[in-house]
Image: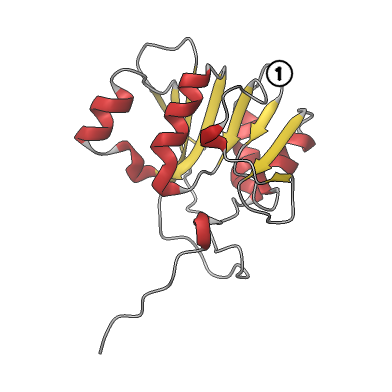
Amino acid sequence: MGAVVLSRQKDDFYPTPEHVTRRLFDVEVFDGSVWEPACGNGAISTVAEDYGYDTVSTDLNDWGYGSNGIDYLMETKPLADNIVTNPPYILAQDFIQHAIDLGIKKHCWFLRLAFLAGAKRFNSLYAPNPPARVYVVSKRPTLWRGDEEPTGSGTTDYAWFVWCDKHKGETELDWI
């Protein structure tokens, strides 16, 4: 018998659970507006708005929220002071590097905890630009494809990775 292989959602549309985003906003304060460049259905943007932030919501695709047809990696100017997003995992490092290159004040990325690993990533990203903080999500969330209804519990470890434009010291690790 062959293994069942579940297909990945087109362009990695996996909405971020609201409680995970709320935990980030409970511990991080942002100076200025927030840009969600992979806004999907607005899962992160609506939380940012609930916390009182002016929010710019864009996405390459039309998932029913924000401005669509906008390729974040092609933007030459920041659309807001800060970024909070759950990027397409395969492009996560490119998204982070682009935020650094754009001079974004603070940028937060919801990623698998395993994103910490790897010598190549360490040398190209973490050594020259260490994140200020990494918040491990203690209760594993489940991320469902954007076309599925959530059921069950999580089996993958996730974290919020936080970069600040002036940070060059050691990375703080904490749990939320």
Quadrant of the rendering where the N terminus is positioned: bottom left
Name the residue tied to disc 1: 32
Task: Decide: is 47 above or below 139.
Answer: above
Furthest-bottom residue in this view: 1
Q: Position of residue 48 (x, y in %)?
A: 71, 35
**Residue at point 63%, 45% (across, down):** 59
**Horizontal side, residue 95 vs residue 14: left or right:** left
**Residue at point 72%, 33% (across, down):** 56
Q: By what rule are the colours in the image chosen? A: secondary structure
**Residue at point 63%, 70% (across, down):** 149
Which quadrant of the figure has residue 36?
top right
Q: Position of residue 85 (x, y in %)?
A: 57, 39
- Secondary structure at badge 1 equals loop
Q: Report the number of discs.
A: 1
Give the amino acid at mark 1.
Gly
Furthest-left residue in this view: 119
Front residue of 115 and 66: 66
Q: Position of residue 122 (x, y in %)?
A: 26, 29
Front residue of 113 and 137: 113
Q: Is residue 81 visible?
A: yes
**Horizontal side, residue 43 vs residue 171: left or right:** right
Q: Position of residue 34 (x, y in %)?
A: 68, 28
**Horizontal side, residue 31 vs residue 102: left or right:** right
Q: Is residue 134 visible?
A: no
**Residue at point 47%, 35% (across, down):** 95
Task: Decide: is 41 above or below 115.
Answer: below
Front residue of 72 and 44: 72
Front residue of 105 and 76: 76
**Horizontal side, residue 13 vs residue 45: left or right:** left
Q: Residues within 10 Å of mark 1 (few under 14, many from 20)?
A: few
